[in-house]
Image (cartoon, rainbow, N blue to C red):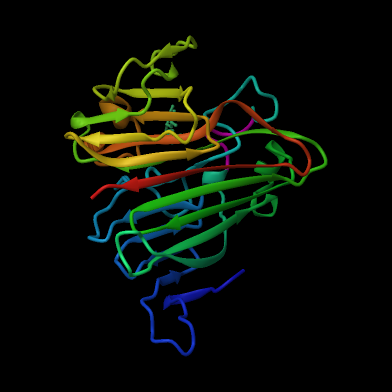
Amino acid sequence: MVGRANKPTALASTPGLAPQPQVSFSDDNSRVTAVLPTGESIEVLLYGATVISWKDKDGTEKLWLSEAAKLDGTKAVRGGIPLVFPVFGTASDHAQTSKLPQHGFARTSRWEFLGKSTSESTPASSTAADLSVKLDFGLSPAALDSDTKSKWPYVFNMIYSVTLSRDSLTTSLVVNNDDDKPFECQLLLHTYLRVQDISKVEIKGLSSATYIDKVNGSSSQQTQSSALTISGETDRVYTPATPPTDPVSVVEGGKTTFTVVRDNLSDVVVWNPWTEKANGLADFAPKEGYKNMLCIEPGSVVGWQTLEPGEAFEGAQTITISN
Ligand SMILES: O=P(O)(O)OC[C@H]1O[C@@H](O)[C@H](O)[C@@H](O)[C@@H]1O
């Protein structure tokens, strides 16, 4: 455990040198916040290691968080970036995870804050160094309740790293199998992006990708023919054929607002509940909020990752904003 502090603190600068701009930081034992000297900020709940806020230098929120989201640890957070592990949705036909609730237990477990670190980079366009901050969180069976442990009795260890830079947010999840038997898992970064007006949004980078449409319940694969627009309930699991480094971008009113680059995550879920589904979700508010959100969820959810004893799987996303 590193650096518990109740009041905001600034990370130390090098002794003997003029004081440098610093990252300010606070940890009140239920949420961790970090603010770059240039104004960008993030806030992460220990419950679920859920990123609940990401603001740019002007204080503009980039993630959508429901006004009715429970932040007290009684329910998975509706908004931000909940973590899905070890099962996406429910999987009654998959023996190892069949007893687990929807989207598994990572988003409803209390994670441990492991520590923070900063790094500097000098962009080509500037001589001043930019700071970024990385926050690390950990989860292992020790933090699970006995009911969850009985439903998923594997010894594992996960590290989730959240890195805030001036124009981007990277979230990276590493799963280690510390057991003496293999286990199978799925994982997903369930990112709720904030948009101004969903009717003006186009999602690019999925053209020619195959997908399963969960709204019509069909298990047959379809192929995306052009940029995707959202005009009704949308719940699709895409598996782009392109390398995962090819970005998925969100374009609003003709301007690219988010670019999502995946690392080692082959699938992308696109979800918007639209009117009826949003009405049915007690923690979704305001009910018109579906117009201001779009879930772009990089993951590994089609099929299963098998981890042998001692093996690890790492997947990450980097979301870049254009101002
Ligand atoms: O209400 P939950 O459990 O947070 O899930 C929200 C949505 O999450 C998406 O990832 C799923 O594809 C949807 O089917 C689901 O409705």
- Number of marks present in the image shown: 0
Residue 125 vs residue 274, the one in the foreground: 125
Residue 73 vs residue 63, the one in the foreground: 63
Quadrant in which ligand 1 is drawn: top left
Q: Is residue 230 magenta?
A: no
Please report the residue visible at 47 percent of the width from the left and 12 percent of the height from the top: 221
Type of secondary structure dominating the magenta stretch: loop
Residue 189 visible somewhere in the drawing? no
* Residue 279, image x, y percentages: 29, 31
- Magenta highlight range: 99-105
Residue furthest to the right: 180
Task: Specify the quadrant of the image occupied by residue 260.
Answer: top left
Residue 230 vs residue 150, the one in the foreground: 230
Please report the residue visible at 43 percent of the width from the left and 71 percent of the height from the top: 26
In the rendered structure, the answer to whether residue 287 lies left or right of residue 307 reads left
Residue furthest to the bottom: 16
* Residue 4, image x, y percentages: 53, 73
In the rendered structure, the answer to whether residue 84 lies left or right of residue 130 reads right
> In the rendered image, which quarter contains the N terminus?
bottom right
* Residue 313, image x, y percentages: 64, 41
Residue 71 visible somewhere in the drawing? yes
In the rendered structure, the answer to whether residue 254 lies left or right of residue 14 reads left
Please report the residue visible at 33 percent of the width from the left and 15 percent of the height from the top: 225
* Residue 156, image x, y percentages: 70, 46
Residue 29 vertical placement versus 297 (above, below): below
